[in-house]
Amino acid sequence: MKIGILAVQGDFEAHAAMLRSLGAETVEVRAVADLESCDGLILPGGESTTQLQFLQEEGLYDAIRKFAADGRAIFGTCAGAILLATEVKNPPQSSLGLMDMTVLRNAYGRQLASDVFFGPSKLKSEPMEMVFIRGPIIERAGNSLEILAEYAGKPVLVQKGNLLAATFHPELTADSTVHEHFLQIVAKRVMRQAEV
Ligand code: GLN
């Protein structure tokens, strides 16, 4: 499986290291052509305003929307989750609008990944380790989203079919549960394609 990671700025290297430790091939995505051979895509943390501008300038905005419409998997963490949301507040900004949720930017955690929080999830029985770096709060999650993890009563990991969004940074902990889950989403589609 080949996973593209948007590599404009932010912590794309940490995602690549985690995915490689799980046996996936990774490719840095900076142009539309980089996406072509990818089975999945990670939109990492960073600054969503800068990333959005880059996507629009490089034609990646439309290419990523098509990537999702083709059924290929996308995982957005923190700034990436902001890009996937249909509505962004604090301040308002446009987005890819692929997951029906309202997010409030810069709501949890400090600028440095110094605090670790724990919350319940559907992916494992023990509490899940969560690092927030000025992460967004999911203020509203539409009915089309499945809530996979929560912190302080708010969703922090949500899925809609091939799309996954986390307001925390699973790539900055030693726990690979969320990345393993993402690779399972990718694998399902790869297997379906192979059957056709
Ligand atoms: N504050 C950032 C934003 O709104 C997100 C922070 C992060 O990705 N760690 O884009």
Image (cartoon, rainbow, N blue to C red):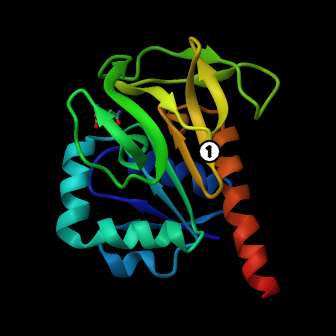
Q: In this view, does 98 lie to the left or right of 63?
A: right
Q: In which quarter of the image is the N terminus?
A: bottom right
Q: In which quarter of the image is the C terminus?
A: bottom right
Helix, strand or loop at label 1? It is loop
User: Can you tell me which quadrant of the image ligand 1 is in?
Assistant: top left
Percent from the top left, x then y, of residue 78? 41, 37
Q: Which of 87 and 33 is in front in this view?
A: 87
Figure check: 185 above or below 65: above
Q: Which of 48 and 177 is in front in this view?
A: 48
Q: Nearer the viewer, residue 59 or 2?
A: 59
Residue 30 appears anywhere in the view? no
Percent from the top left, x then y, of residue 165? 52, 42
Residue lying farthest bottom?
Answer: 196
Percent from the top left, x then y, of residue 28? 39, 66
Which residue in the structure is indicated by mark 1? 144
Q: In this view, does 163 lie to the left or right of 161?
A: left
Q: What's the residue at 30%, 74% (across, down)?
A: 31
Percent from the top left, x then y, of residue 35? 43, 75
Residue 74 appears anywhere in the view? yes
Q: What's the residue at 70%, 48% (across, down)?
A: 181
Figure check: 115 above or below 181: above
Mark 1: few/some/many CA within 10 Å (<14, 14-19, 20+): few
Q: Quadrant of residue 122?
A: top right
